[in-house]
Image (spheres, grey):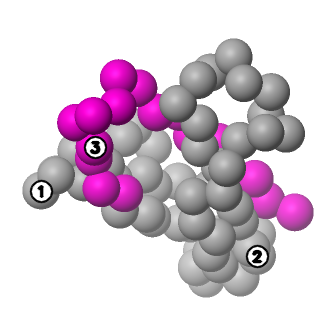
Amino acid sequence: NPPIISGGKLILTGGGGTPGGGYTLLTSTNLLTPLANWKTNTTGTLDGFGAFSNNIPVSGSEAARFFDIRTP
């Protein structure tokens, strides 16, 4: 799903995963950084429909932040 900014937070949502499966949301401020070096922002469990939703505070001090989601 497209990202939304609301109340000073970036809202990331998505679906199509395995219901009850785990996921990891990775982040980096540099898109050219190898994915193996991105940092874990959060981990979670997909809901009963295989969807997730995360609210991430927006920082005005960063020029950009990139995200990647991984499922096992």
Q: Height in image: 38 above or below 11?
A: above
Report the mark closest to the observer, 1 or 3: 3
Q: Are marks 1 and 3 in contact (CB under 8 Å)?
A: no
Residue type pointed to by label 2: Gly
Q: Label 2: few (<14), some or many (≥20) within 10 Å?
A: some
Report, in whole angstroms, how far the alpha carbon at label 2 lies from the one at label 3: 29 Å
Percent from the top left, x then y, of residue 57?
30, 56
The reply, left or right, for residue 12 in relation to residue 24 is: left
Between 71 and 39, the one lying in front of the other is 39
Q: Label 1: few (<14), some or many (≥20) within 10 Å?
A: few
| Secondary structure under the numbered disc 3 in the rendered image | loop
Of the image marks 2 and 3, the number of the one nearer the N terminus:
2
Q: What range of the chain is rendered magenta? A: 56-72
Give the quarter of the image for residue 17. Answer: bottom right
Residue in the image at 76% along x and 76% along y: 21
Q: Which residue is mark 1?
A: 7
Q: Which residue is mark 3?
A: 59
Q: Which residue is mark 2?
A: 21
Q: Quadrant of the N terminus?
A: top left
The reply, left or right, for residue 28 in relation to residue 37 is: left
Report the mark closest to the observer, 2 or 3: 3
Judged from this view, the residue extending furthest toward the left is: 7
Report, in whole angstroms, how far the alpha carbon at label 1 lies from the one at label 2: 29 Å
Of the image marks 1 and 2, the number of the one nearer the N terminus:
1
Q: Quadrant of the C terminus?
A: bottom right
| Secondary structure under the numbered disc 2 in the rendered image | loop
- Count of number-bearing discs: 3
Percent from the top left, x then y, of residue 67?
57, 40
Task: Examine the structure image and report whether residue 40 is included in the region drawn in magenta.
Answer: no
The reply, left or right, for residue 3 in relation to residue 46 is: left
Can the viewer see residue 69?
A: no
Give the quarter of the image for residue 51. Answer: bottom right
